[in-house]
């Protein structure tokens, strides 16, 4: 599914998403990925929501986001507040949804100038 035709200037944008791949800034990814609103897109070391750990969320603190969107694959799974606690205690919002919805939400947020980070898991 294609999300938007062009890249927003200076902002990472997600162009497309399927169950097995993502296109971010015209680059195709076939692994889970972390997409900050600006800066380097990197492979994320977790493929399933069940495997998420506190350390995954602690690692996002250095980016100083306003909100973290977690795409949990083809089906929505809630992220335990225990895992996202390092972010929540610093008033950083954490939302989980299926990966396609997370891609759309991320693009809307960064299009509004928000400091959003997407953690997108691929099944």
Image (spheres, grey):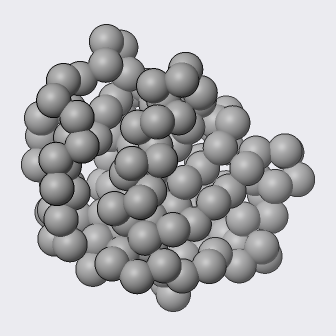
Picture quadrant of residue 20 = bottom left
Q: Residue at x 77, y 73 (%)?
A: 81
**Vertical placement of 64 versus 73: above or below?**
above
Viewer-proximal residue among 88 and 97: 97
Quadrant (top left, top right, bottom left, bottom right) of the N terminus: bottom left
Looking at the image, residue 82 sits to the left or right of residue 63; the answer is right
Looking at the image, residue 5 sits to the left or right of residue 49; the answer is left
Looking at the image, residue 70 sits to the left or right of residue 17; the answer is right
Q: Is residue 45 visible to us here?
A: no
Q: Residue at x 60, y 50 (%)?
A: 68
**Vertical placement of 87 versus 35: above or below?**
below
Looking at the image, residue 73 sits to the left or right of residue 105; the answer is left
x%, y% of residue 84? 72, 65
Q: Residue furthest bottom?
A: 50
Q: Residue at x 64, y 75 (%)?
A: 79
**Vertical placement of 74 versus 69: above or below?**
below
């Amino acid at each position: 599914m294609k999300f938007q035709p062009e890249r927003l200037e200076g902002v990472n944008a997600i162009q497309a998403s399927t169950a097995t791949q993502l296109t971010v800034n015209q680059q195709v990814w076939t692994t889970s990925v972390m997409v900050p609103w600006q800066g380097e897109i990197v492979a994320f070391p977790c493929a399933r929501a069940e495997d998420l750990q506190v350390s995954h969320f602690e690692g996002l603190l250095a980016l100083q986001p306003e909100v973290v969107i977690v795409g949990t694959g083809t089906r929505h799974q809630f992220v335990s507040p225990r895992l996202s606690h390092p972010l929540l205690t610093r008033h950083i919002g954490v939302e989980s949804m299926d990966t396609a919805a997370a891609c759309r939400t991320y693009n809307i947020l960064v299009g509004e100038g928000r400091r959003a980070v997407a953690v997108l898991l691929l099944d």
